[in-house]
Image: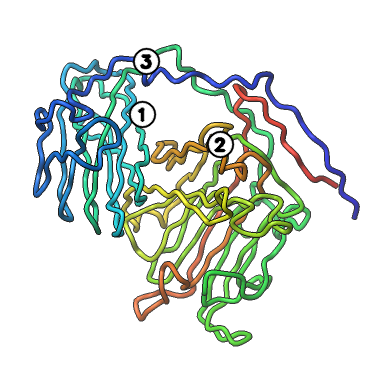
Amino acid sequence: MRRDRFFILLAMTLALPISLLSAAQTLIENGGFETGVPEPWVFIGNGSLISIEARTGNHAGYLADEGDSMEQTITGLSPDTTYILSGWAKIEKFSSGSVVIGVKGYGGPTLDGGVQGKSYERVTHTFTTGPSSTSAVIYCYRNFGGQAFCDDFELTRQTSAEPTPERVLIWSEEFDGDRLNESIWSYELGYIRNQELQTYTNNSKNVRVENGNLILEAHAENVDGFAYTSGSVETIGKFDFQYGRVDVRAAIPIGQGIWPAIWTLGSDFPQVNWPHSGEIDIMEHINAEPLLHGTIHYSDANRNHQSIGQFTTVNPTDLQAFHIYSIEWDAEKIRWFLDDVQFAEVDITSADMTEFHQPHYLKLNLAIGGSWPGPPDQTTVFPARYLIDYIRVYTLTEHSVYLPLLVD
């Protein structure tokens, strides 16, 4: 079957909206801690200001122990009004763990987003106050692991000059048939990566389309020397895209050693291999942890592997119901969303990040064990079933987007 590549030009301009965040007056007092005293921030636990590890200026917030936090109550907000919070955080250089920046008490659900990096990463949240809410609590919380640092908080009111990008659907997979569409999808087969414990198969027990869902199902069974079987599919050589928004509605299994993912690789992966192709992890969840991850992987100018990962806290049991996992990807940033609430953002304008300015293809898989989650144990329930209801790819019409497709 011959396939011809063609290009669709979607949208008319390369111009990106200029963020007003830095230009607007911040509503947070002492957001960079440059007064040299914590007020009006309140430290809970063993936290303080320090004169080292600042991102800018001379001071940063320091959280010494697991569970420490710092917070500021912002008053004088307007009801039914949208605000943008941003802050920067990192963990100590020779440790592991995570630190969370969030907002609560504004008349809506608590929003938080975390980082695990050893250099400062920015976390942003957009929230709308309730109909009678005039305040919000901004916080930084050391989730677990090593010492953590926070700095440079800003809170601004969103203005009408910051338009919401219009989405135009340009590709979707609804899984409405009774079998996997192999003109779009290919199976991964065998052992692939990450010291995982499964072999991937094209057996309908592991990969099938049923009742409007793609089902990837893992079984505890000995096949080809492996203790588990599971499913993984990808659009390599059949569908790829560059920039835009991706929505995936899915219900994931939880349990020790269970690792479902939605991700992309650069379309040049067969030629350059990983991580030089770049990788965007739209969603990863391991075990029964209360963390949902969004990550990028790439190679720097010296061809060394680099990664930037952020997360949001979740009730893992809730993830067994359907949720929408999304990214918005343009020439400047990648943003991650859970049920349309942003929880992470990464700047991709660095000269080292050329991997994210080229087409990528999609991957869906359910891994068992491996170097990150560890193996299943006696609490793990099999079969483990991962359901994907749909995948929808949109262009954001404020950008010029060339979308390469492979079609019959």
Q: Are marks 2 and 1 in contact (CB under 8 Å)?
A: no
Specify few, some or many for label 1: CA neighbours under 10 Å numbering under 14, 14-19, or 20 or more.
Answer: some
Task: Locate residue 118 relative to residue 328 in the image: left or right.
Answer: left
User: Residue 405 has which mark?
Assistant: none
Q: Which residue is drawn at 57% across and 69% down?
A: 193
- In this view, 298 is above or below 41: below
- In this view, 216 is above or below 43: below
Report the amino acid beneath label 3. Answer: Ala
Report the amino acid beneath label 2. Answer: Trp
Seen as rendered, the residue at the extreme top is: 160
Q: Which residue is drawn at 61% across and 42% down?
A: 354
Q: Are marks 3 and 1 in contact (CB under 8 Å)?
A: no
Specify few, some or many for label 2: CA neighbours under 10 Å numbering under 14, 14-19, or 20 or more.
Answer: many
Callout 1: SS: strand
Measured from the top left, where is residue 103 in percent x and y? 25, 34
User: Residue 329 has which mark?
Assistant: 2
Report the amino acid beneath label 1. Answer: Thr
Pointer 3 residue: 23
Task: Locate residue 19 relative to residue 38 in the image: left or right.
Answer: right
Instruction: Give the CA separation, mark 3 to mark 2.
Output: 24 Å
Q: Earlier in the sequence, mark 2 or mark 1?
A: 1
Callout 3: SS: loop
Callout 2: SS: strand
Pointer 1 residue: 126
From where the camera sits, is residue 108 visible?
yes
Measured from the top left, where is residue 329 in percent x and y? 56, 36
Query: Given this view, does label 3 or label 1 mark the residue nearer the observer?
Result: 3
Query: Given this view, does label 3 or label 2 mark the residue nearer the observer?
Result: 3
Instruction: Give the CA separation, mark 3 to mark 1.
Output: 17 Å
Measured from the top left, where is residue 373 in percent x and y? 41, 68
